[in-house]
Amino acid sequence: MTESVDDAAIRELKEETGVTDVFLEQLYTFGSLGRDPRERVVSVAYYALTSLQELPLEASTDASDAQWFELAEVPPLGFDHEEILQCAIARLRNKIRYEPIGFELLPARFTLSQLQRLYEQILERELDKRNFRKKLLKMDLLVDTGEKETEVAHRAAKLYKFDTQKYASLKQAGFTFEL
Amino acid sequence: MTESVDDAAIRELKEETGVTDVFLEQLYTFGSLGRDPRERVVSVAYYALTSLQELPLEASTDASDAQWFELAEVPPLGFDHEEILQCAIARLRNKIRYEPIGFELLPARFTLSQLQRLYEQILERELDKRNFRKKLLKMDLLVDTGEKETEVAHRAAKLYKFDTQKYASLKQAGFTFEL
DNA sequence: TCAAAAGTGTTTTCTGTACACCCATGC
DNA sequence: GCATGGGTGTACAGAAAACACTTTTGA
């Protein structure tokens, strides 16, 4: 009674996974009859995006019931939770095409190849390396941090970060991020 | 307890406005504290699209509290209902660009000019007549009904209808409607 | 010196945009 | 015959797509 639905989502995410300060957005409200055979339940589902590399330690190591799975390896889920998951994936696939949410799934500094692999996995198709770089760099929303990868057994790639401020002001002015 | 949230939306819409059998979609769930100062309320909002021309008679004439307004003439709304309305408009503006929901706001048979005016009003910018027609007809989703407008004081325009079947199968095959 | 991924330009094709006039109809 | 909106094609520019080799680095 004293907590907004958004705040409840933030709290639950933290309690179950230890994850805080990430992209979190309301997904959909599931309200069909019989989704839980025990009683009538309406669920306001949320989804969060974060980078595995930036998970808080406790999230990956503590002994809670929550675990991380590769999408292809998610075990059978209870109730209508498979439907909810598919709904979230559909949202991500749509949204990533016209909003820069891909960056939420990467560390703050990332290489262009990481970014490209991310898009390829989510969109489930291959992208041309040169065209991909051309397009993204032309938007002028990626900042070269001057740093490079370390501990790789090949030529080290430049690390970029996403210019959130600049995106916000461009968006204000009617610009649409589009891949 | 015995009605799904979707069904409740369908029922409410009918009770308040007499409108049935229209596009109806869940919009967003509003769950902040204090949205209703009297008590804690979580609202699952829905929005519907229909053509004024196809409204059932009782909807426009009966003496219920519900009324139709031009968007620019909506009076001050209670609680956070202004926010909800803006959310619906934002959804419509986004969605109309990549899904064929504009047709939900027109009669089953419509002219290309009607369609263009609709898009211009929702997107709030002018479109070029020739380019608009070229693009839409090229998608091959509009069927010429062979009929024409009547009772107009100028050359009568062809009436088209949207090919829902064809769109469904194209969509299946990966096609995306885009304006 | 080899393996592995980083990085880089040009050409061709397609798509979007700009633009102006004749046509049909009712009054 | 005139006012009103219906209907049509072309030229140009910018974006998307196709495509292959050299560079850097650690092992």
Image (tube, coloured by chain):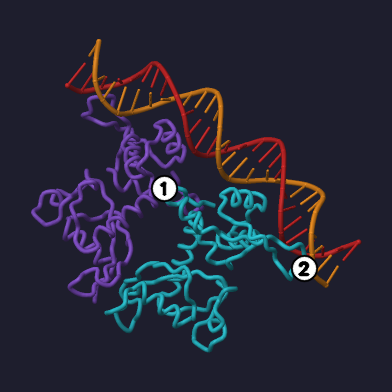
Chain colours: A purple, B cyan, C orange, D red
Residue A150: x, y in percent?
A: 23, 30
| Parent chain of label 2 | B
User: Is A51 displayed left or right of A62 in the figure?
Assistant: right
Residue sitting at the far left: A63
Find disc 1 in the rendering and name its residue. A97
Label 1 secondary element: helix
Label 2 secondary element: loop
Q: Residues within 10 Å of mark 2 (few under 14, many from 20)?
A: few
Residue sitting at the far bottom: B63
User: Is B124 displayed left or right of A77 in the figure?
Assistant: right
The amino acid type found where label 1 is placed reads: Arg
Residue under the point 59% across and 48% down: B138
Residue under the point 63% across and 56% down: B126
Find disc 2 in the rendering and name its residue. B153
Give the number of the disc on residue A34: none
Residue A98: x, y in percent?
A: 43, 49
Q: Are marks 2 and 1 on the same chain?
A: no
User: Is B148 displayed left or right of B24 in the figure?
Assistant: right
Depth order, front residue of B130/A169: B130
Depth order, front residue of B146/A93: B146
Residue under the point 54% across and 62% down: B102
User: Is B64 displayed left or right of B150 in the figure?
Assistant: left
Res A160 → quadrant: top left
| Parent chain of label 1 | A
The amino acid type found where label 2 is placed reads: Ala
Q: Quadrant of the C terminus of chain A?
A: top left
Residue B15: x, y in percent?
A: 44, 83
Distance in Å between CA atoms under marks 2 and 1: 45 Å
Depth order, front residue of D7/A144: D7
